[in-house]
């Protein structure tokens, strides 16, 4: 039975035969990141005791190269579509810190991979279609969220520092949801408005999640600390 490693190698070989060098390098980078994500976090999706036992035996103490590649080495390609959300919505944002170009490329590569897997009957066609749709959305949303992250950081740096200890009602730390957006203003979990550049408010969407610390001073709410923007 083909493993994830076998199938991803086959996918890359097919692309290398068709693409120019620069385009292929993008595919190679994204697939390499997908392998890393699967090997690091794929075990979280294991549902049966037998699968968990197989993984534990293959991983062992985790000290060897084989152990670190255990997930892709022992499981089949049916595990790939169910990992799309973890890879696109978490790994690329929080672990890779990729450029806007890389995030855009990742969406295109992952959409192509899902369709390719279905065409070769490696995965269920319905699951592949859902994965491809998710990847297509990611190719648009991830670069947009990355740009928003940069603009929010710039706004945070430009805001005057708040003096003294803040009252509990004037301090908020959370994985907050964007609950309202107006030109030049964003609300997080209903707290706001936070003044931001219009370009930032144009990018932000209600429902996106932001790892943020907010403080309220004489001029209103502002960002004190900023993590990542999660658009999916």
Image (cartoon, rainbow, N blue to C red):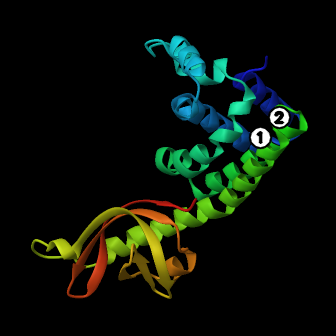
Which residue corresponds to the image point at 45% horizontal and 82% vertical from the top-left?
197
Q: Position of residue 45 (x, y in %)?
A: 57, 34
- The image shows residue 9, relative to residue 116, as above or below, that is above
Which residue corresponds to the image point at 60% horizontal and 37% vertical from the top-left?
33
The quadrant in which the C terminus is found is bottom right
Q: Position of residue 60 (x, y in %)?
A: 47, 12
Q: Pick the residue in front: 150 or 192.
A: 192
**Residue 24, numbered circle:** 1
**Residue 16, numbered circle:** 2
| C-beta proximity under 8 Å, tags 2 and 1 | yes
Q: Pick the residue in front: 94 or 119.
A: 119
Q: Quadrant of residue 145?
A: bottom right
Name the element at disc 1.
helix
Q: Quadrant of residue 157?
A: bottom left
- The image shows residue 32, relative to residue 73, as above or below, that is below
Q: Is 57 situated left or right of 225 in this image?
A: right
Q: Which residue of the protein is positioned furthest toward the left in this rendering?
A: 164
Q: Is residue 120 visible?
A: yes
- The image shows residue 216, relative to residue 153, as above or below, that is below
Name the element at disc 2.
helix
């Amino acid at each position: 039975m083909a493993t994830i490693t076998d199938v991803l190698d086959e996918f890359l070989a097919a692309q290398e035969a068709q693409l120019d060098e620069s385009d292929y390098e993008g595919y190679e980078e994204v697939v390499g990141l997908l392998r890393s994500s699967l090997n690091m976090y794929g075990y979280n999706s294991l549902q049966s005791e037998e699968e968990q036992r197989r993984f534990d035996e293959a991983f062992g103490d985790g000290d060897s190269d084989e152990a670190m590649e255990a997930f892709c080495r022992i499981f089949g390609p049916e595990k790939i579509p169910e990992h799309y959300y973890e890879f696109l919505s978490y790994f690329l944002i929080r672990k890779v810190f990729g450029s806007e170009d890389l995030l855009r490329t990742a969406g295109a590569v992952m959409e192509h991979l899902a369709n390719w897997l279905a065409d070769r009957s490696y995965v269920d066609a319905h699951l592949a279609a859902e994965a491809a749709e998710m990847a297509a959305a990611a190719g648009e949303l991830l670069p947009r969220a990355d740009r928003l992250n940069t603009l929010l950081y710039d706004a945070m740096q430009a805001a005057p520092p708040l003096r003294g200890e803040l009252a509990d009602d004037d301090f908020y730390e959370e994985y907050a949801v964007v609950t309202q957006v107006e030109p030049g203003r964003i609300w997080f979990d209903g707290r706001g408005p936070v003044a931001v550049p219009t370009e930032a408010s144009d990018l932000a969407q209600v429902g996106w999640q932001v790892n943020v610390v907010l403080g309220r001073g004489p001029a209103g709410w502002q960002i004190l600390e900023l993590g990542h923007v999660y658009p999916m």
